[in-house]
Amino acid sequence: MARCGGPGVLVWVGGGTPNKGGVPGGSGLQGGFSGQKDTREVVAVKCVSKRSLNRASVENLLTEIEILKTIRHPHVVELKDFQVGLGAQPGGSALPRGHRAVPTVQVLHGAPAAQWDSEHIYLIMEFCAGGDLSRFIRTRRLLPEKVARVFLQQLACALKFLHDHNISHLDLKPQNILLSAPDNPQLKLADFGFAQYMSPWDEQHVLRGSPLYMAPEMVCRQQYDARVDLWSVGVILYEALFGRPPFASRSFAELEEKIRSDQAIELPSRPPLSPDCRDLLQRLLERDPRRRISFQDFFAHPFVDMEHAPGPESFPKATELVVEAVRKDQEGDASAALALYCKALEYFVPALRYESDPRRKEAIRAKVGQYISRAEELKALVTSDSRSLLQQGSTAREVLKEMAKDKPRLCAALEVAAAAMAREEDGRDDGDALELYQQSLGELLLLLAAEPAGRRRELLHAEVREAQSMGKEALAESVRSSCTVQ
């Protein structure tokens, strides 16, 4: 599709009239329109020359305008407005009704105000500063599974929205997936030139899309339906994880031969992937569309896990669950509280990924650390071996012993400390208690240095302080005993 000014022009758009300097409302980019509230924003303008359009190109453009006019979703690029010059349209096609004149547009670099003309069609789009997914993958060579999963969740959210509206994209590829910002980017699905309103039972024969990401049934010019988008998702996920698409080829003939082959696609052994990720890839990249994963199963797949995808609803859901967890905890229902804390944490993690404000993110992270510590303590208390401790009202030392069952060195050090305490409580002042305290304290200090943050570390730190205190008392008692003997 031909465009003027490259792939798009970065502009300020807003109401009002620019002043004579070519920059709205004074010098620099911080100025506003004189006497009016500054409502400008940065947008991208897709500029299409009418002379370059044949009838098929016009139909694609009309489809893109019509679809983007009617949908709004956080992971679909927004069409803010469009402008079509007067005069006969190429191919004799009429443009959609209801379009309106666009606001005043000012080019960012200070060029004269853009003039709408009859030779071009202008689509004013949401500006995505992070570039496209293709460049994102290329600059990193490949993506860790956790990062790829976040992007897949966002893509799945966009596809679920389109699927619910019977829309198939038909040209999914990394170049058509934009990123909102360089840091903490949000995925935005773009370029709907080949999209179609398709019911699940609709079938097409027209060749559409980019061959590298095209489903075999399309390349073989067989009947196809909306499931071609799922194949494309598989190719994109494969490329993100392994750094290249499954059918990377030097020529179109080689590419076509690979796609037409009946051989199953083998996944590389490196980098290692989780079982859920490998299962999803294999089910997406099924050559036979009848055996390929369905949309319903794709959205419900554990690797996609749309329920816990980062989004604006993640934090409210987490908060609601943790409030209930605290209430159960206060009532003494440890099992219910633990289950609720764990469910809340499943939403807090995506909430942290979604949050862009650094101070708010740090506050959430601090709270999450507290909830994790409490969940660790409850987990130790609700195990079958420690229910009696829970019923009796266990001490911190008893809880630490229960949480140390997977740490033999820690268990041994705690036993030495307990032996020292027992000798002291029995009134035996032969100096052995001091030696045992010193022995346990040295081991506990080493273990404390290696223990990661969490509830067990907090209890271990308290145990070290207690051992230090008891050791001082044992030392004092030993000195007094020595003086008495002399």
Image (cartoon, rainbow, N blue to C red):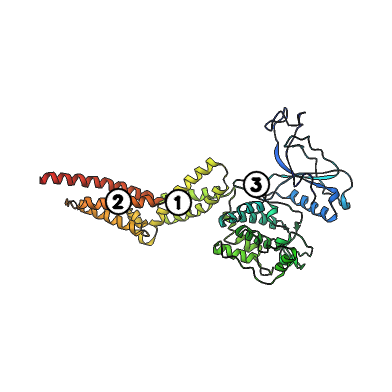
Badge 3 element: loop
Q: Secondary structure at mark 1?
A: helix
For the residues carrying marks 1 and 3, which lies nearer the camera in this image? 3
Query: In which quarter of the view is residue 113 placed?
Result: top right
- In the picture, the disc for residue 130 is 3
For marks 2 and 3 on the same chain, the one whose residue lies earlier in the sequence: 3
Name the spot of residue 157 as percent of width and height, x first: 64, 54
Report the side of 238 relative to 216 (left or right).
left
Which residue is the extreme one toward the left?
Answer: 486
Residue 372: give its label.
Answer: 1
Mark 1 is surrounded, within 10 Å at the Cα level, by few (under 14), some (14 to 19) or many (20 or more) other residues, namely some
Above or below 220: residue 15: above
Question: Where does the image place residue 103, in percent across and percent down from the top left?
Answer: 77, 38
Q: On screen, 173 above or below 36?
A: below
Residue 53 image position (x, y, % from top left): 84, 52
Classify mark 2: residues with Cα within 10 Å, few (<14), some (14-19) or many (20+).
few
Q: Residue at x 38, y 48 (%)?
A: 458
Rendered residue at 18%/51% (across/down) = 431
Q: Residues within 10 Å of mark 3 (few under 14, many from 20)?
A: some
Residue shown at the point (38%, 52%) measured from the top left: 450
Q: Which residue is mark 2?
A: 442
Residue 120 located left or right of residue 408: right
Label 1 – label 2 distance at C-alpha:
28 Å
